[in-house]
Image (cartoon, rainbow, N blue to C red):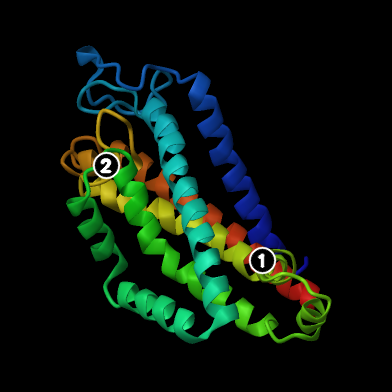
Amino acid sequence: MRKGSFELYVGCALVLALLAVATVSIFYTPYPINGIDAEVRSMPPSPAHIAGTDNLGRDIFSRLMAGTRFTLLVALSTVTASSLAGSILGLTSGYFGGIFDEIIMRTVDALTSFPSILTALVVVTVLDWGKLTIIVALVIMFTPSFTRIVRMGALKYRDAEFIQSCRVQGCSTPRILLLHIYPNVLPLLFPSIIVGLSNAILAESSMSYLGLGIQPPTPSWGWMLSEAQSMVFKSPWYAACTGTTIVLAVVGFNCLGEGLRKLSENRSL
């Protein structure tokens, strides 16, 4: 088996399963995600409710399905926006250098000097933009890491022979950046984007657990885990199912990112 193949297979299987669940939940869940039934409150797993029910009689499996959709939406939005912002800042910093590099990197250093979760908490507390607030907070939290990666690639290629040849031929700076440098940086960036999805899922779940992420009644893995904490002895299946779902999502994206990184290293040898 080639180096990284096992992680790649495991990651692909888990991520595809998550995407399938998220897609299916748009059209179908076994029960209404906010349907309350007092007669089946705190029921353990059974054929009728395979993950049991919570203290309000809501089907946990249905809510986990819907939570997959909302959590992945936040994670994908966060990583897409932060990777684009990091790419623009990193290319500008690495290619032009000088005052641009100083301003951008000192700002990045200032952001990373504080614990990332603390930065996100401050942003969520200060802003009041509804559902967009958690995404904005996580974008600010994740952009510095992508900026550093892209800057490193831009520094590596800006004086390469093929870039100098492009300058001699009269290529514009945007063309050099977008068509010649950035495509060579992507192999470095892409595995970090995949791993960033797992970190975004974990960060969103942490924020929701603290009550600062996706707000009820919209199902969220972090909020569901927070609810489960108060009834962990009465309904342990609630915490177990929710926690296992979060772990599988994080492991899936981490394995996929690690597998892609090792595959890229094998090809470069």
Q: Nearer the viewer, residue 51 or 64?
A: 64
Question: Residue at label 2?
Answer: 129
Residue 166 in sight in this render: yes
**In the drawing, does residue 125 fall left or right of residue 253?**
left
CA distance separating discs 1 and 2 = 34 Å
- Dot 2: within a 10 Å radius of its alpha carbon, few (fewer than 14), some, or many (20 or more) residues? few
Q: Which mark is residue 174?
A: 1
Q: Which amino acid does label 2 sit on?
A: Trp
Residue 43 drawn above or below residue 18: above
Q: Can residue 152 be seen in the rendering of this structure?
A: no
Amino acid type shown at disc 1:
Pro
Q: 43 or 214, which lies in front? A: 214
Question: Percent x, y for residue 264?
Answer: 72, 70
Q: Foreground residue, 252 or 154?
A: 154
Query: Farthest residue toward the left?
Result: 230
* Left or right for 163, reference 59: right
